[in-house]
Image (cartoon, grey):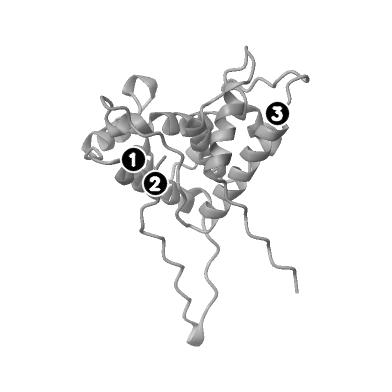
Amino acid sequence: MPAPTPPVAATTDADIARLQHLLSRLPPPLDPPDISALDGFLCGVLLQPNAVPAEQWQVYACDLDGRPPASAVDIAGLMAIVRRRHRELDDAIGGRRWFDPWLFEPEPAEDVGGALRPWVAGFALALGRFDGLLALDRPGLREPLAMLYRHLPAQDLELDAELAELIESIEPVRTLAEAAEDLVCAVLLLADLGRPLAPAPAGPAGRRSAPAPRRGARGRAR
């Protein structure tokens, strides 16, 4: 019997604060993402139908253009947290479970959608660099994409007419918790297309056992 898979270590608030600090200390010309954009980027990477090799996605953790840091720059601590978050998200998405997206609280004069822009921008960066998910062009792909892309300025996107119409039809979110729930729902819907689950084993009398339900509770937003 194979040994049980050890549980994935969850990132903590202290990990998140340290990661943001380490990202902010990367020297120019590196242009690192903030933690929210990085979180969205990792989800976009993990939704690809074929696993993206680590050496291809990890360079974007330190620079939005994928430029590698100079050899003298120590990124070991930074990448340890990034890889842990990657595993944590992979485990949640693969199991169709809730995860807490890394979102900033909106500024007093900012709408809720504006607080999601960094996360969605990071997600869009991943789908632009790794196009396996978008190449599927399956029914049901546009709806969850519209749920996410509605938080970005229209001029930043190249949208077909159907996707633009879908975005216009979606009501704006009212709270950050509601926005986080919509975001996670969209990610899991996309996972059904890019990373479909294996068929459930048959139960008694040939009936297939029902899949585990998705968690409906709202997680904390940062």
Residue 153, above or below 97: above
Question: Distance of mark 3 from mark 2, alpha carbons?
Answer: 32 Å
**Secondary structure of residue under mark 2:** helix
Q: Mark 3 or mark 1, which has the lower sequence index? A: 3
Q: What residue is drawn where x is 74% and y is 18%?
A: 70
Residue at the extreme bottom: 205
Answer left or right for 147 relative to 28: left
| Residue type pointed to by label 1 | Met
Of residue 95 and residue 177, the one placed in the foreground of this image is: 177
**Secondary structure of residue under mark 3:** loop
Q: Which residue is mark 2?
A: 186
Residue 192, above or below 38: below
Q: What residue is drawn where x is 32% and y is 40%?
A: 176
Residue 22: x, y in percent? 61, 27
| Residue type pointed to by label 3 | Ile
State which mark lies toward you, 3 or 1: 3
